[in-house]
């Protein structure tokens, strides 16, 4: 299933890389989770190295099954979501808005 | 295989003929839920009260001579990743526990207009990521045919709800096989429509270029009827195909005479012999009914797993960025915004979801994008090209739906890659955006059901349903 020769052409994943990706993904991982994730991602990426042997230089990437063009609706006013119904789902609503902690880390 | 439960078509007919009522039909299903749900755990949320009110209103309307639509009085279950206004929608995740959507998914609105009675929200692998329904934050669903085994996934609750007679039909979502594989493992019919045929508006997104909603039913005719109700253009989904829904119920009796059925010349390793024997029997049945069997090749098939497990997590990592503890769902309070995000997501997501977010974020991150995501998109093109070439010489392709019958709970949870290999036959369809369905076709090892998968090109549903109906007649 895995192939060590393929791994040479794909970037290696390290605990440092996993920690950086966890930060990018805004996921606080424990040390144990980081270690497990490093092992599991390494295993998967080794397996995924199978596509390295394909010559893909002339292949056009396919991000969607069918061509997509922007779709506009008629410019008419339609009812939106009920404001109170939306705010009822918020963890901390306040004065008709969503309250969040300060972005700079100190309470104003 | 004949189901011991009454089909959607028969329920509709009996209610219309006045032989039974929507309320009576509902009570029969609720009684089965009462007797077995504790053991099966098909549901995250049972809607007995609102279902009873809906059934009573339908009965009153029908008594007064009003038409309540093609599904009047049919009890239907919904996978718990479809928005239901004011009713909890969790995606089987702690991060959405308690969330009540402020709107209905388009499929929910269409079912209600057609007179369906929604009985509950079914369990799934968290955010539809899994092949066994063991990744639910609220515990696994068990296969009604053998409760020591999984029902498949990710729409395991929806498959189990139909197989156990808790609902006459249900809806699931299929990103890499999440309708077809559980349908096969539970012995019911499951359809993954052409991408864009059924609206995704109000389906909580996993991988937007792959996700499609489709039905689980006891019979092929039921699936055709459900498709006609939920399918068709929706201006609220920008990827919805802007064309009329083809009639499927009308083609079921047309047979397969003269049709060309594709057979993989190189079958991937890992299939149980009993599964392959059932596939051979399916080819023989179609041949006996007048079809021709044609050998075809999908040279890129073995690379699909890699393409899928890079594309789907990449899209998921982007889609799941919205769960940040600000507007809905769980929040873990913290001193500043960034640490609130990280703590909330760490507490709210389960292991498999975290693994896919990490994989997807990595595949999309600077320095790795070309090596992984970029390459995966090119492999996706290769499989689409393979299909285009294959469909030059055949009308549909038959494969197993799953390489194995339902496996014991816990057997594959320790190694994510082993679990991913369950999806080898179902993934290519999603990558290409094509149609496919699973039809029960006898039993394999441990007397568990085997599903045969029919693959068809985009918008090939009418042909696909003709083949499905023929297989059903032969099974």
Image (cartoon, coloured by chain):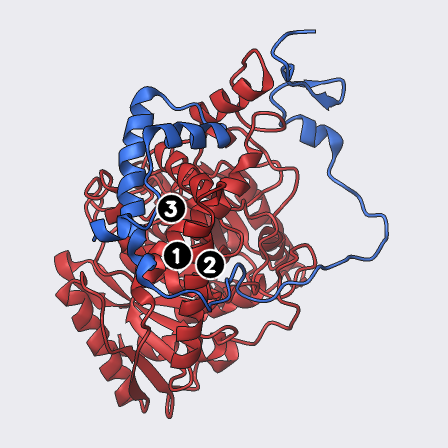
Chain colours: A blue, B red
Evaluate whether residue B28 shows in this view: no
Tell me the residue that label 2 is attached to. Answer: B377
Q: Is residue B124 above or below residue A22?
A: below
Residue B138 x/y as whole percent: 37, 32
Q: Could you tell me if the residues under marks 1 and 2 are in contact, i.e. CB atoms within 8 Å?
A: yes
How far apart are labels 2 and 3 at the CA level?
31 Å
Q: Residue furthest front?
A: A8
Tell me the residue that label 1 is attached to. Answer: B307
Mark 3, Cα crowd under 10 Å, few <14 / some 14-19 / many 20+, is many
Kind of element beneath mark 3: helix
Query: Looking at the rendering, which quadrant does residue A93 occupy?
Result: top right
Query: Looking at the rendering, which quadrant does residue B197 occupy?
Result: bottom right
- Residue at position x 60%, y 60% in the image: B114
Tell me the residue that label 3 is attached to. Answer: B157
Kind of element beneath mark 2: helix
Mark identifier at residue B345: none
Residue B178 x/y as whole percent: 39, 53
Q: Earlier in the sequence, mark 1 or mark 2?
A: 1
Instruction: Judge from the rendering whether residue B444 lies leftward or rightward of residue A12; answer left or right.
Output: left
């Amino acid at each position: 299933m895995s192939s060590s020769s393929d791994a040479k052409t794909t970037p290696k994943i390290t605990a440092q890389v996993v920690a950086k990706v966890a930060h990018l993904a805004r996921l606080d991982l424990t040390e144990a989770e980081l270690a497990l994730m490093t092992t599991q991602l390494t295993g998967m990426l080794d397996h995924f190295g199978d596509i390295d042997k394909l010559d893909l230089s002339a292949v056009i990437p396919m991000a969607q099954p069918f061509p997509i063009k922007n779709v506009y609706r008629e410019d008419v006013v339609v009812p939106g979501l009920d404001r109170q119904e939306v705010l009822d789902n918020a963890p901390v609503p306040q004065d008709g808005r969503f309250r969040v902690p300060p972005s700079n880390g100190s309470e104003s | 295989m004949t189901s011991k439960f009454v089909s959607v078509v028969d329920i509709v007919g009996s209610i219309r003929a006045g032989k039974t009522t929507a309320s009576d039909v509902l009570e029969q299903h609720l009684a089965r839920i009462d007797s077995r749900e504790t053991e099966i755990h098909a549901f995250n949320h049972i809607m007995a009260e609102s279902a009873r009110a809906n059934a009573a209103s339908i009965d009153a309307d029908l008594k007064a001579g009003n038409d309540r639509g093609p599904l009047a009085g049919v009890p239907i279950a919904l996978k718990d990743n479809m928005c239901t206004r004011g009713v909890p929608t969790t995606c089987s995740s702690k991060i959405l526990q308690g969330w009540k959507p402020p709107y209905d998914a388009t499929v929910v609105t269409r079912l209600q207009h057609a007179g369906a009675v929604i009985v509950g929200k079914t369990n799934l692998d968290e955010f539809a990521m899994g092949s066994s329904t063991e990744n639910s934050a609220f515990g696994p669903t068990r296969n009604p045919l053998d409760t020591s085994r999984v029902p498949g996934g990710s729409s395991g609750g929806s498959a189990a709800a139909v197989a156990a007679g808790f609902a006459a039909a249900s809806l699931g979502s299929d990103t890499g096989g999440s309708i077809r594989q559980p349908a096969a493992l539970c012995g019911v019919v499951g359809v993954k429509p052409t991408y864009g045929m059924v609206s995704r508006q109000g389906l909580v997104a996993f991988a937007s270029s792959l996700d499609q909603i489709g039905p689980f039913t006891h019979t092929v005719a039921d699936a055709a009827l459900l498709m006609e109700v939920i399918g068709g253009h929706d201006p609220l989904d920008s990827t919805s195909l802007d064309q009329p829904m083809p009639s499927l119920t009308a083609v079921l009796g047309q047979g397969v005479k003269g049709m060309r059925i594709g057979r993989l010349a190189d079958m991937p390793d890992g299939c149980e012999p009993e599964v392959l024997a059932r596939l051979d029997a399916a080819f023989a049945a179609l041949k006996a009914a007048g079809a021709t069997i044609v050998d075809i090749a999908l040279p890129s098939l073995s690379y699909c797993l890699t393409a899928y497990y890079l594309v789907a997590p990449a899209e998921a990592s982007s889609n799941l960025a919205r769960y940040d503890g600000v507007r809905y769902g769980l929040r873990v309070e913290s001193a500043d915004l960034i640490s609130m995000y990280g703590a909330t997501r760490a507490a709210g997501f389960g292991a498999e979801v975290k693994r896919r977010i990490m994989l997807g974020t990595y595949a999309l991150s600077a320095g790795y994008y070309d090596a992984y995501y970029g390459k995966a998109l090119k492999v996706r093109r290769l499989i689409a090209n393979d299909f285009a070439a294959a469909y030059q010489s055949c009308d549909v392709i038959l494969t197993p739906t799953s390489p194995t019958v339902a496996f014991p709970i816990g057997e594959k949870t320790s190694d994510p890659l082993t679990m991913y290999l369950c999806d080898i036959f179902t993934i290519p369809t999603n990558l290409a955006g094509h149609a496919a369905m699973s039809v029960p076709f006898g039993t394999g090892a441990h007397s568990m059901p085997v599903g045969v998968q029919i693959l068809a090109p985009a918008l090939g549903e009418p042909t696909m349903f003709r083949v499905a109906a023929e297989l059903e007649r032969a099974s």
